[in-house]
Image (cartoon, helix red, strand yellow):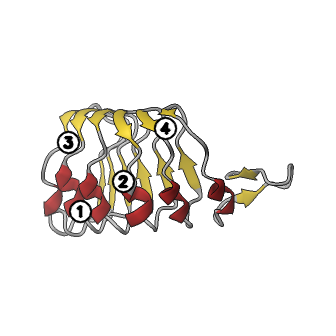
Amino acid sequence: MQNLQILDLSKNHLSGNLPECWGNFDSLIVARLSSNHLSGAIPNSIGGAYRLQRLHLNNNSLTGQLPSNLKNCTRLEVLDVGDNKLSGKLPQWIGNDLLDLAALRLRNNSFYGDIPSLYCQLSKSQIMDLADNNLTGNIPHCFGNFSGMIDDGTTPGEFSLYR
């Protein structure tokens, strides 16, 4: 499977843990495993799929923290792990290493703490969905500077991602 570029197993009834074989997917660009019954932690080996551009693990029952080896996937444009049971503080490395992210969806998990100011470096961000977590503190002031956000024209300074 070294030449596999797109893996789409979404909207099935798959269960169990994600396998540790991610390092074998040298050419993988898109991984969609959303809307299944997957559980357990996201394996550290996922960082071995360093060519990944889109990772959809949303709507499962994944637990634990986002593995730090995911920062090796510097080409990621979409990271969607929303609607799981992930926890911990929002990782700083997302804002430091995943600079091509256009969509970051971490909604409906159990992340806690402040929104890292390093997320301000995600200048290509069009969607940053951190809703339904346990986040505290202030919203970083620089969030209003994202060039990918669309001014909807209704209220000065308010932005919309959808028209």
Considering depth in this image, is 113 or 40 the residue closer to the camera? 113
Separation of residues labelled 3 and 2 (CA atoms): 13 Å
The amino acid on which the numbered mark 4 sits, given as a three-letter code, is Arg
Estimate the x, y position of residue 11 in percent, counting from the top left.
Answer: 36, 37
Residue where numbered disc 4 is placed: 107
Estimate the x, y position of residue 127 in percent, counting from the top left.
Answer: 57, 53
Separation of residues labelled 2 and 4 (CA atoms): 15 Å
Residue where numbered disc 3 is placed: 18
- Residue at 37 percent of width and 36 percent of height: 35
- Residue at 86 percent of width and 50 percent of height: 154
Q: In which quadrant is the N terminus drawn?
A: bottom left
Q: Select label 3 or label 4 by which is in front.
A: 4
Separation of residues labelled 3 and 4 (CA atoms): 20 Å
The amino acid on which the numbered mark 2 sits, given as a three-letter code, is Leu
Q: Is residue 35 something that shows in the picture?
A: yes
Find residue 99 and report its image quarter. bottom left
- Element under disc 1: loop
The amino acid on which the numbered mark 3 sits, given as a three-letter code, is Leu
N-terminal-most mark, 4 or 1: 1
- 94 vs 29, left or right, is right
Residue where numbered disc 1 is placed: 49
